[in-house]
C-alpha cells in the first residue's frame, strides 16, 4: 500500500518549519479554578497564584522538552482559567471587584515566575442579562488590564441559544474605553474581546477559558503558518483550476494541523494532562509574508478587493476539510484569522483603502474570528463602537458560530495614523469607523431574541 506522504512531502514540512514560519502558535492549558472560590479576596488570590505557578512550571518545562525533541517552534505558552465570575460571586458583597483584581495580580506574578506568556479567564457570561457577579468583573477589568502584563479578559454577550445582549455589548464598550483611559494606552484593547457562541476549548486569547464539561486540566493547541500555505501554492501550474487550488489548500492544511496534533499528543504525554482540541485557524504574525493576505494573493486575489470574500471562503473550507482529517478533535475558532494589526498584509490593505471596516465585517461571514485587532480613533463615539460590535456579533448569532470583536481605541489618533503595539500585536493604520452616526438603535435596552435557527435545534 502506497504511503499517504512520501519523503519529498516530509521534506516539504521540514522546509515549512525552517523557512516558511510554520509553527505552533500556542499550547494552552485550561484549568478548573472553581476550587479557589472560597473565603475572602486574599484567600482566593493565593489559591489562584499557587494554581497558576504550579501548573505553569509543569507546562513550560514539558513544552521546552517537546520543542527540543521535535524541532518544532512553539511561540507561546498560555493558561486559561474558569471565568473569574465565579470568584466574584463567592466573594463578600461589596468586595467582588476587589477579589477579581487581587486574583489577576496574583496570576500575573505567578505567570511571570513560571514562564507563562498569558493567562486568560478574566471574563463574564452575560448572554441574557448582566448579573451582579458579571457587573463586578466588568468593574474590575479596567484595573486588571492596565496593571497586569499577562492577564486578558472577555465578555460573552450572546449566543444562538440566547440571542444577542445589547446591554452586555454596551458594557463591553464602556469597559474598553475606561480601560484605555486608565492605562493611557491602546494596549487594553488588544487584551479584551467581546464574543458570541464561545467554545470551551479555545486556545487563543483573550477568549480562552476553562469551559463547562471539560476535564479539570486539559490542553489545547493553536497552529500558525500562513506563510507556509502561501509558499505551498507557489508550485501550482499557471492557470490551475479552482479545484486544483482547493486540493492544494486541503493538503497543506492537513500537514499543518497534523503537526499541531503531534505537539498536543507529546505535551499531553509529558504532563499527564488530558489532550483536548487543535484549533485549525491559521494565525498570522506581523512578519512580511506570514499573512492571510499573502495567502489570498497566492490564490490570485487581493485582500479587500472584489473576489476576496470568495477566496477567503474557499481557503477556510479547504483548511477545515484538510485539517479536520488530521486531528482527533478540532475546536476553538477553526477558521482564518484576520487581525488587522497582527497581519502586515491586512494592515497594508487598510493603508491602501481596500480593507475598510465593513469589508472586514463582511469577511467575518465566511471566517470564524470576527472584527479583530481593529484600531480606531480614541474619540470614536461609544454608540458607534457598539454598533460595529453588534453588526459583527449578530452574524455569529444568526449563523450559529463563534465570532469576536477586538476594537483598539487609540487616544489622540486620527484615521491614517499608524499605531504600533509591538511583538505579535503588530501595527496598522488607524481605521475610519464610518462617517454616519448609528442613531438610537444601539442604545436600546434588552437583547435581540434568538434566531429561527434556535427553534430548528430544539
Image (cartoon, rainbow, N blue to C red):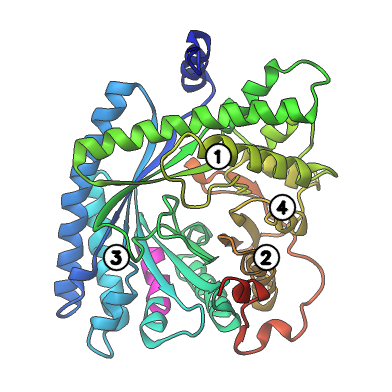
Residue 456 or residue 107, whichever sits in front: 456
What residue is disc 2 on?
A: 395
- Disc 4 is placed on an element classified as helix
Q: Tell which tag, 2 or 3, sits nearer the viewer.
A: 2
Region rendered in magenta:
138-147
Few, some or many residues within 10 Å of mark 4 (<14, 14–19, 20+): many
- The residue shown at (23%, 83%) is 91
**Which picture quadrant has residue 240?**
top right
- Give the CA separation, mark 4 to mark 1: 15 Å
Which of the two discs, 3 and 1, labels the residue nearer the N terminus?
Answer: 3
- Give the CA separation, mark 3 to mark 1: 29 Å
Q: Is residue 430 positioned above or below 39 on the image?
A: above
Which of the two discs, 3 and 4, labels the residue nearer the N terminus?
Answer: 3
**Which picture quadrant has residue 392?**
bottom right
- Disc 1 is placed on an element classified as strand
Which of the two discs, 4 and 1, labels the residue nearer the N terminus?
Answer: 1
**Which picture quadrant has residue 50?**
bottom left
Residue 43 position within the rendered picture, expressed as x and y whole percent measured from the top left: 14, 73
Q: Look at the magenta stretch and give its main secondary structure.
A: helix
- Label placed on residue 363: 4
Residue 400 or residue 145, whichever sits in front: 400
Contact, CB < 8 Å: mark 3 with mark 4? no
What residue is disc 3 on?
A: 104
Q: Quadrant of the C terminus?
A: bottom right
Q: Is residue 446 positioned above or below 382 on the image?
A: below
Which of the two discs, 2 and 4, labels the residue nearer the N terminus?
Answer: 4
Residue 342 position within the rendered picture, expressed as x and y whole percent measured from the top left: 57, 44
Q: Is residue 298 visible?
A: no
Q: Residue furthest front?
A: 1
- Label placed on residue 282: 1
- Disc 3 is placed on an element classified as helix
Amino acid at each position: 500500500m502506497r504511503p499517504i506522504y512520501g519523503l519529498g512531502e516530509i521534506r516539504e514540512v521540514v522546509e515549512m518549519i525552517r523557512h516558511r514560519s510554520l509553527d505552533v502558535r500556542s499550547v494552552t492549558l485550561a484549568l478548573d479554578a472553581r476550587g479557589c472560590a472560597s473565603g475572602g479576596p486574599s484567600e482566593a488570590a493565593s489559591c489562584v497564584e499557587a494554581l497558576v505557578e504550579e501548573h505553569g512550571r509543569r507546562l513550560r518545562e514539558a513544552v521546552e522538552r517537546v520543542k527540543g525533541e521535535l524541532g518544532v517552534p512553539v511561540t507561546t505558552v498560555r493558561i486559561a482559567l474558569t471565568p473569574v465570575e465565579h470568584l466574584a460571586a463567592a466573594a463578600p458583597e461589596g468586595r467582588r471587584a476587589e477579589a477579581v483584581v487581587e486574583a489577576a495580580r496574583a496570576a500575573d506574578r505567578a505567570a511571570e515566575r513560571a514562564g507563562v506568556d498569558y493567562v486568560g479567564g478574566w471574563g463574564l457570561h452575560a448572554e441574557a442579562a448582566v448579573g451582579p457577579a458579571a457587573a463586578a468583573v466588568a468593574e474590575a477589568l479596567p484595573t486588571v488590564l492596565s496593571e497586569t502584563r499577562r492577564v486578558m479578559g472577555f465578555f460573552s454577550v450572546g449566543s444562538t441559544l440566547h440571542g444577542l445582549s445589547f446591554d452586555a455589548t454596551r458594557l463591553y464598550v464602556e469597559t474598553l474605553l475606561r480601560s484605555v483611559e486608565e492605562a493611557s494606552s491602546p494596549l487594553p484593547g488588544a487584551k479584551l474581546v467581546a464574543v458570541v457562541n464561545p467554545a470551551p476549548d479555545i486556545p487563543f486569547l483573550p477568549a480562552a477559558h476553562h469551559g463547562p464539561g471539560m476535564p479539570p486540566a486539559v490542553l489545547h493547541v493553536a497552529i500558525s503558518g500562513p506563510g507556509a500555505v502561501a509558499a505551498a501554492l507557489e508550485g501550482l501550474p499557471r492557470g490551475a483550476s479552482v479545484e486544483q487550488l482547493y486540493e492544494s489548500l486541503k493538503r497543506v492544511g492537513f500537514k499543518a494541523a497534523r503537526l499541531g496534533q503531534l505537539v498536543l499528543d507529546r505535551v499531553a504525554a509529558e504532563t499527564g494532562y488530558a489532550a483536548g482540541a487543535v484549533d485549525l485557524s491559521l494565525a498570522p504574525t506581523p512578519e512580511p509574508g506570514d499573512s492571510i493576505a499573502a495567502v489570498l494573493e497566492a490564490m490570485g486575489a487581493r485582500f479587500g478587493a472584489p473576489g476576496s470574500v470568495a477566496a477567503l471562503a474557499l481557503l477556510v473550507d479547504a483548511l477545515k476539510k484538510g485539517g479536520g482529517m488530521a486531528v482527533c478533535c478540532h475546536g476553538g475558532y477553526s477558521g482564518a484569522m484576520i487581525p488587522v494589526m497582527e497581519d502586515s498584509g491586512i494592515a497594508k490593505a487598510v493603508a491602501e483603502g481596500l480593507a475598510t471596516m465593513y469589508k472586514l465585517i463582511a469577511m467575518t461571514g465566511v471566517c470564524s474570528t470576527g472584527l479583530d485587532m481593529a484600531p480606531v480613533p480614541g474619540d470614536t463615539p461609544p454608540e458607534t463602537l457598539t454598533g460595529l460590535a453588534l453588526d459583527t456579533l449578530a452574524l455569529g448569532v444568526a449563523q450559529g458560530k463563534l465570532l469576536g470583536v477586538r476594537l483598539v481605541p487609540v487616544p489622540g489618533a486620527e484615521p491614517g495614523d499608524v499605531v504600533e503595539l509591538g511583538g505579535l500585536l503588530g501595527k496598522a493604520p488607524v481605521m475610519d469607523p464610518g462617517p454616519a452616526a448609528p442613531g438610537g438603535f444601539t442604545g436600546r435596552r434588552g437583547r435581540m431574541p434568538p434566531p429561527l435557527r434556535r427553534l430548528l435545534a430544539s
